[in-house]
Image (spheres, helix red, strand yellow):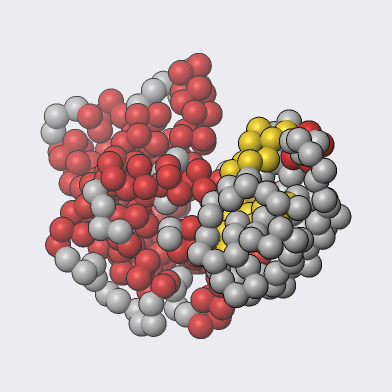
């Protein structure tokens, strides 16, 4: 069976052209294959059917390949219809295009990401310290804003307001935006949160991927870039939606729009730190990675929504009740939030590392 140097497969799913590889021992041309009993073609100099071990594949596993002889003309449309998505692999120096449903391929990668994340979490037990400290900083920043508009400071009232801090800001937006002390405190707290968030999360990201526990960003410019990125995301996903009247159609629509929109930024802060990008470059990098890592990104994003919703439901029962609150309740909330944040960040950073190359 002699085939062209670059065979073209036609069918219901379109066309796929094999990419020529460097000839190697036992394999002298491009290979277009599919695992299992279905299909396709192997073309090399001798014109005979050829199977090869994919020892240079992404996970160095052996693929048993079965081939069907193609008598003439284009391959049947059902051939490609059941193998729409593909993954490029290299086998013994030849261009080898193996066909497998994309969901199964992505599930394999998710399993690999989870294994890497588990190894990282078991070796770096103090990662949650970073988001825990950041949680305390956020509480202190809100305390400054809260005390600027509330004449009497009550621990019980503050703890309840802190649980729904953005709703509190929305209700008191007129007072907070009026020129004077509340506006000055609000702006100072906002800038401080952006800078301190960048100062903590930049070394935290490197702690996830590295061997130690860094305590500061690598450079002042990295701090500024990451702080600017967080300022943009806070404005887009918190300030603008909560500046709308509570319960209005616009507020409800903004709340719905924020969910898919925030997914586009999911890898943005990692790109700022690991790729030395500015806010706009980080967003573009996030979009590019999202196109490649769409399934694990969506899976971990949905996991985040579920975990944060469960946390809000669990603690909301205590905060919404009229019983006296103990100081251990908000402390336990900060600890649980830090653990969830660490878990999700490790998953996403492992995903970023897996797909960034």
Q: Is residue 267 left or right of residue 41?
A: left
Viewer-proximal residue among 208 and 283: 283
Q: Is residue 31 visible?
A: yes
Q: Quadrant of residue 122?
A: bottom right
Viewer-proximal residue among 281 and 322: 281
Q: Is residue 65 left or right of residue 25?
A: right
Q: Quadrant of residue 182?
A: top left
Q: Residue at x 45, y 49 (%)?
A: 289
Q: Position of residue 143 (x, y in %)?
A: 31, 51
Number of marks? 0
Q: Going by the picture, which residue comes out furthest to the top?
A: 249
Note whether 71 is above or below 97 in the view shown.
above
Viewer-proximal residue among 236 and 82: 82
Q: Position of residue 251 (x, y in %)?
A: 46, 23
Q: Is residue 348 left or right of residue 198?
A: right
Note whether 93 is above or below 103 in the view shown.
below
Q: Is residue 144 visible?
A: no
Q: Going by the picture, which residue comes out furthest to the right?
A: 37
Q: Position of residue 310 (x, y in %)?
A: 63, 50
- The quadrant of the rendering that contains the C terminus is bottom left
Q: Residue at x 35, y 79 (%)?
A: 213
Note whether 80 is above or below 62 in the view shown.
above
Q: Residue at x 21, y 59 (%)?
A: 222
Viewer-proximal residue among 285 and 77: 77
Q: Residue at x 35, y 70 (%)?
A: 206
Q: Position of residue 285 (x, y in %)?
A: 37, 47
Q: Is residue 356 left or right of residue 102?
A: left
């Amino acid at each position: 069976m002699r085939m062209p140097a670059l065979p073209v497969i036609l069918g219901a799913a379109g066309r796929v052209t094999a990419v020529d590889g460097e000839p190697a021992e036992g394999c002298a041309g491009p290979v277009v294959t599919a695992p299992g009993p279905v299909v396709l073609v192997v073309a090399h100099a001798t014109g005979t059917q050829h199977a090869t071990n994919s020892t240079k594949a992404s996970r160095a596993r052996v693929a048993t390949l079965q081939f069907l002889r193609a008598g003439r003309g284009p391959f049947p449309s059902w051939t490609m219809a059941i193998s729409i998505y593909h993954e490029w692999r290299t086998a013994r120096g030849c261009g080898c295009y193996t066909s497998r449903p994309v969901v199964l391929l992505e599930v394999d990668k998710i399993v690999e990401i989870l294994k890497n994340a588990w190894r990282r979490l078991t070796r770096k037990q103090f990662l949650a310290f970073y988001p825990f400290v950041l949680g305390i900083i956020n509480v202190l920043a809100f305390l400054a804003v809260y005390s600027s508009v509330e004449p009497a400071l009550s621990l019980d009232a503050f703890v309840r307001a802190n649980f729904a801090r953005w709703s509190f800001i929305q209700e008191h937006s007129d007072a907070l935006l009026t020129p004077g002390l509340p506006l000055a405190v609000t702006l100072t707290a906002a800038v401080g949160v952006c800078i301190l968030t960048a100062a903590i999360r930049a070394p935290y990201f490197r702690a996830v991927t590295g061997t130690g526990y860094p305590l500061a960003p690598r450079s002042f410019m990295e701090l500024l870039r990451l702080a600017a990125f967080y300022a943009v995301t806070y404005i887009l996903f918190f300030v603008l939606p909560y500046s709308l009247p509570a319960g209005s159609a616009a507020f409800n629509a903004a709340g719905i729009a924020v969910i898919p929109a925030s997914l586009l930024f999911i890898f943005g802060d990692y790109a700022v730190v690991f790729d030395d990008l500015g806010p706009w470059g980080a967003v573009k990098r996030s979009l590019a990675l999202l196109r490649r890592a769409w399934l694990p990104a969506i899976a971990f994003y949905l996991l985040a929504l579920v975990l944060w919703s469960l946390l809000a439901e669990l603690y909301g029962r205590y905060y919404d009740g009229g019983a006296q609150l103990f100081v251990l309740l908000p402390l336990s909330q900060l600890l649980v939030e830090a653990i969830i944040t660490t878990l999700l960040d490790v998953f996403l950073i492992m995903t970023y590392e897996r797909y960034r190359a």
